Image (spheres, rainbow, N blue to C red):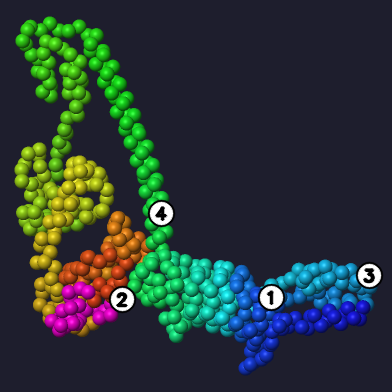
Amino acid sequence: MMMMMTTTMMMVVTAGCPWRCHCVERDAALVVQCASRNLEHVPTDLPADTAVLLLSSNQIHHLPAAAFQKMVLPMAALALLEDLANGAIRRERVFREREDLLANDDNWLISRFRMCDKGLGHLRELDLSHNVIESADVDAFRDVATSLRELDLSDNRLAGIPADAFAGVSARVHLARNPWHCGCALQEALRHVRLDPETAGRLGCATASRPEFVGLPVVRALDSGVNFCNFHHRTTDVAMFVAMFCWFSMVTAYVVCYVRHNQEDTRRHADYLKLLPNAPATAGTVVVVGGGGIVGKDYDTDSKAVIIRNALRRERIFRPRLDISSFPEAFLFERYRFSSATIIYVNHILRPYISNLTHRGRALTSEQTLSIALRFFANGSFLYNIGDAEHIGKATVCRAVRKVTLALKHPLPAMVVFPGHKPVRIIKEEFHRIAGLPNVLGCIDGTHVPITAPSENEWDYANRKSFHSINVQIICDAACIITNVEAKWPGSVHDSRIYRECRLSNRFARGKEAKALYKVRCFPL
């Protein structure tokens, strides 16, 4: 019995430092040295006050969930040791517990009682470099996320890592010299990582979802504005295309069945007309019916079909058009965002480009065409809603909006000029009155205008917010009047590059204008 108690006490005492590791104190901090020990997994019996854990140069190949935690014997186990020392437990029970020890690979106290797991709340530095780590679970660093300050995962075999593996980890992370696969998972994971600035440039793309980035540093690839998650968007687009194709096939089948059904109805009507008595007609007389159909004495089936078709033809209905000059100013500004005088002025400028060449078929006037487009620009509603409000059809609304949009390009060079139509001194004084900023000529920023995904170079138009857009750079003066527009770049291009490539930046570089734009965070003016 005394030998069993001595063995048990030795096991409890040696549990303070993991097996095959060396524990020392440095600057009142416990350092667990497990480097070059040929370990294949992270030790599970780490001391609770471990501050530095060195696991480099081992054979660890996987980091499971909750890999870094300490194991504490419960009070029941300590009570058992005390009873064993006092002789309160019979020898047979001790032997039975010893048999449990020999039958189980784990510690006999661990197999006898439940274990309490607690995280290493004092761990500040974790070195896992020069291992063969190939994967890690999403909760691998969960128990040390708040206390960890340095994490070294360099020189391993990591090709990817879960997106939320570093969530909550505020430590400086070393990830250099790993065969990374540059894709969506790595891009999402790096959003939560504070990379070490000295080794961040040595993160290389061993493989990539886009071949042009193979061999390049990961940081350089991400700084170029690429979005590796576009592959998933393309997969979704393919699935949507398949669904739309199935829907179109169903609609086509419905239309075919509908046409065949109408053909049967037409044939039945024609057969019914055959049974009707023919009206007497003199030789050589003809009867002219609606729609231009001519029926002679021989009243055949084709002529009867013409009569039916003309009877079923839908007549064109011309609804009364709106006269915007008859509405009050409040009504116009609420629905068109312009006053009557401004609408007349804009119509005078765009009339040569939006007027119809003929007035046949009750063609729209230039004023009506402009009012339709302005109402669409004002609320961005559906075309049929605009058509119902303006008493016209949806196709007419579509043509009017397109015509006005193309016409607005012609006066653009004369209307949008930098720094503006006012003297430079007046512009600077207006900005100075607003916020006290001296020598400011304009405010610059970029905005993403959503578009439908194009069929060519689709990934170039996917921005950092994961939708397709055109990145438009706009400059305005103190009165919010636009003085410069740059609207030719896809959504993946950064704002700073748009500014570097625009004509205004070249004018500043040549000294043609004083560099006096209000600086925004993304624009290195």
Q: Which amino acid does label 1 sit on?
A: Thr
The Cα–Cα distance between marks 4 and 3, rounded to whole angstroms, is 67 Å
Q: Name the residue under label 1.
A: 44
Helix, strand or loop for the magenta stretch, by majority: loop
Mark 2 residue crowding within 10 angstroms, few (<14) / some (14–19) / many (20+): few
Q: Is residue 395 magenta?
A: no
Q: How far apart are marks 4 and 2 (CA)?
A: 31 Å
The residues bearing labels 4 and 1 have C-alpha atoms spaced at a distance of 43 Å
Badge 2 element: loop
Residue on which disc 4 sits = 236
From the image, state whether disc 2 or disc 3 is nearer to you. Answer: 3
The stretch in magenta equals 501-525
Name the spot of residue 11 as percent of width and height, x first: 80, 80
Q: Could you tell me residue 20's position as x and y percent?
A: 71, 83
What mark, if any, has residue 522 been given in the picture?
A: 2
Judging depth in this view, the residue of 385 and 216 nearest the camera is 216
Three-letter code for the amino acid on which mark 4 is drawn: Thr
